[in-house]
Image (tube, rainbow, N blue to C red):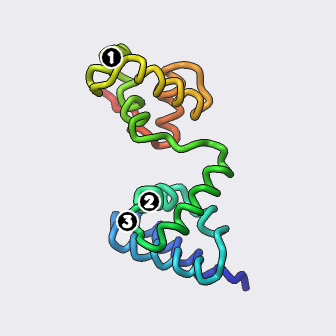
Amino acid sequence: MIRWVLVEAWLLECDTALAVGSARRARTALRRALGAAEEMGVLRPLVYASTRVADFLTEQVGALGAAGRRARDVLAVRWARERVPPVTPREIAVLTLLPTRLSLEDIARDLGVSVNTVKSHVRAVYAKLDVDSRRAAVDAARARGLIEPATMP
């Protein structure tokens, strides 16, 4: 029997809880998975957890107390494995406005930053998503669940 089956079971519980909207149950399962992984000295099941669990782990990392260190290790390995640096909250804010018809100047005004700052965020997003246009960035961000899918008018 693989020694980290218990960790995978807790991760499955976490994923299931997230699927049904039970953040409290998901948080408990995530903490137990992290604790079991710490006891066993394993990262693999956490690194290869579902995207939903990994996203939840990213959201919860600061609130996990002592387990936060293990969570940060897991995320570092996961991001290195994916070779895609995480998109920052400010880059998400810019990404959210890219599908609109707002100019970069308008986006800067809405976010209360300079146009150069918006341009820097856009360049960073293009690099992280491996795209070279506004449209491609929006499509890639939607495909990765970084921004909401397009809605029909």
The secondary structure type at the circle numbered 2 is helix
N-terminal of the pair, mark 2 or mark 3, is: 2
Query: Within the image, what quadrant is residue 78 found in?
Result: bottom right
Of the two numbered discs 1 and 3 in the rendering, the one whose residue sits closer to the viewer: 3
Residue that badge 2 annotates: 56
Q: Distance between the Cα atoms at labels 2 and 1? A: 31 Å
Which residue is found at the position 56% from the left and 81% from the top? 36
Query: Within the image, what quadrant is residue 107 found in?
Result: top left
Quadrant housing the N terminus: bottom right
Of the residues shown, which amino acid type is indicated by label 2? Phe
Q: Nearer the viewer, residue 19 or 64?
A: 64
Q: Are marks 1 and 3 in contact (CB under 8 Å)?
A: no
On screen, residue 128 versus residue 150, left or right, reads right
On screen, residue 127 versus residue 3, left or right, reads left
Residue that badge 1 annotates: 102
Q: Is residue 119 above or below residue 24?
A: above
Could you tell me residue 121's position as x and y percent? 46, 27
Q: Distance between the Cα atoms at labels 2 and 3? A: 11 Å
Q: Distance between the Cα atoms at labels 1 and 3? A: 36 Å
Label disc, if present, on residue 63 of the rendered structure:
3
N-terminal of the pair, mark 1 or mark 3, is: 3
Which residue is found at the position 58% from the left and 42% from the top? 85
The secondary structure type at the circle numbered 3 is helix
Which residue is found at the position 49% from the left and 21% from the top? 135
Could you tell me residue 12's position as x and y percent? 52, 72
Of the residues shown, which amino acid type is indicated by label 1? Leu
